Image: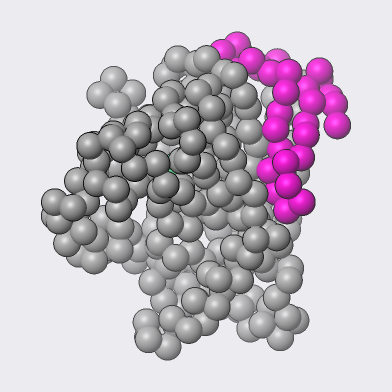
């Protein structure tokens, strides 16, 4: 499909499209912005190739979509706190990478992110791909009975597992050494409630809104009671036919919609360098 001189090419059946004909180092015209925005809503994650952008241009592009977040646990750049340096160096322990598990960004906020924009500065020759999964598809393929049950339910989210008490041992452990500056703290224990099924504020479509990294339990249920159903949903949500996989090159950009996707940074490039900049666009309260 082409509009405003921008070509949109779907990369998989479930979600994801490459956008051609746009230079993100330049301010987008309103018609270019509209075409990119529409592709983002239609495909849930959009990809750009061969871009060369400064931190300021990265921030400017993100701000076209909303205010930018400053992550409370992963440090931003000294002069641009809105940009997280997602970094793994050859010396870093093989067992961990930032975002190395299926998740949706910062669902431990009362107002989780609208989207995240990741720009590749340096990538391994092979490995370090990112996978994405479509949460509309995850919801739409549940049975009517389970849909009806989940529609009325609320889930509790927190950053505990990643940045709190549950994550502390992992960060303390020398084996988990990473070049990224990530802190832990008691503020990660704060619990926030979100509907298990959320309606996308722009498309009006319903999607599954629980994730393995930050969902702790269903409201009113114990963790032990919640876990079997959550496990079922996590596994269902990332069935291969609901996913796409992005092969990074230097200058690639991925912009994913956190309101209707999960993503997973694949940790298969031990001993190699991968360096990316991420800005996160603030979102609204899920309903
Ligand atoms: C993230 O979860 O933001 C990191 C994704 C990636 O590095 O591919």
Judging depth in this view, the residue of 163 and 188 nearest the camera is 163
Number of disc labels: 0
In the picture shown, does residue 241 fall above or below 236? above
In the picture shown, does residue 84 fall above or below 60? below
Q: Quadrant of the C terminus?
A: bottom right
Q: Is residue 202 visible?
A: no
* Quadrant assignment, res 29: top right
Q: Position of residue 183 (x, y in %)?
A: 20, 47
Judging depth in this view, the residue of 175 and 214 nearest the camera is 175
Residue in the image at 81% along x and 18% along y: 5
* Ligand 1: quadrant of the figure: top left
Judging depth in this view, the residue of 187 and 211 nearest the camera is 211
Q: Is residue 162 visible?
A: yes
Q: How is the image coloured?
A: one colour
In the image, taking residue 51 as reference, residue 123 lies left or right, namely left
Q: Position of residue 62 (x, y in %)?
A: 53, 29
Residue in the image at 68% along x and 43% along y: 16
In the picture shown, does residue 153 fall above or below 169? below
In the image, taking residue 60 as reference, residue 12 lies left or right, namely right
Range shown magenta: 1-30
Q: Which SS type dominates the magenta stretch?
A: loop
* Quadrant assignment, res 254: top right
Residue in the image at 65% along x and 36% along y: 46
In the picture shown, does residue 193 fall above or below 283? below
Q: Quadrant of the N terminus?
A: top right
In the image, taking residue 70 as reference, residue 287 lies left or right, namely right
In the image, taking residue 115 as reference, residue 39 lies left or right, namely right
As for residue 276 lying within the magenta part, the answer is no
As for residue 4 lying within the magenta part, the answer is yes
* Quadrant assignment, res 28: top right
Q: Position of residue 282 (x, y in %)?
A: 48, 41
Residue in the image at 35% along x and 47% along y: 97
């Amino acid at each position: 499909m082409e509009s405003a001189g921008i070509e949109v090419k779907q990369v998989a059946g479930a979600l994801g499209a490459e956008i051609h004909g746009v230079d993100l180092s330049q301010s987008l015209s309103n018609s270019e912005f509209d075409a990119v925005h529409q592709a983002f809503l239609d495909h849930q994650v959009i990809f750009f190739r061969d871009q060369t952008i400064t931190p300021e241009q990265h921030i400017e592009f993100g701000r076209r979509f909303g205010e930018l977040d400053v992550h409370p646990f992963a440090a931003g750049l000294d002069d641009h706190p809105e940009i997280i340096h997602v970094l793994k160096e050859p010396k870093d322990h093989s067992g961990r990478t930032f975002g190395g598990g299926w998740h949706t960004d910062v669902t431990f906020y009362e107002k989780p992110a609208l989207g995240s924009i990741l720009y590749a500065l340096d990538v391994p020759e092979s490995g370090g791909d990112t996978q994405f999964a479509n949460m509309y598809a995850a919801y739409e393929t549940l049975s009517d009975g389970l849909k009806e049950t989940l529609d009325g339910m609320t889930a509790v989210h927190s950053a505990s597992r990643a940045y709190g008490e549950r994550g502390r041992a992992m960060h303390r452990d020398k084996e988990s050494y990473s070049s990224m500056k990530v802190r832990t703290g008691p503020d990660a224990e704060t619990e926030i409630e979100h509907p298990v099924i959320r309606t996308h504020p722009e498309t009006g479509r319903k999607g599954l809104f629980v994730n393995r990294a930050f969902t702790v339990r269903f409201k009113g249920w114990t963790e032990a009671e919640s876990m079997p159903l959550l496990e079922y949903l996590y596994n269902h949500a990332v069935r291969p036919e609901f996913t796409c996989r992005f092969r990074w090159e230097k200058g690639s950009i991925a912009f994913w919609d956190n309101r209707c996707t999960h993503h997973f940074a694949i940790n298969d490039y031990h001993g190699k360098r991968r360096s990316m900049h991420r800005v996160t666009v603030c979102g609204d309260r899920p309903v």
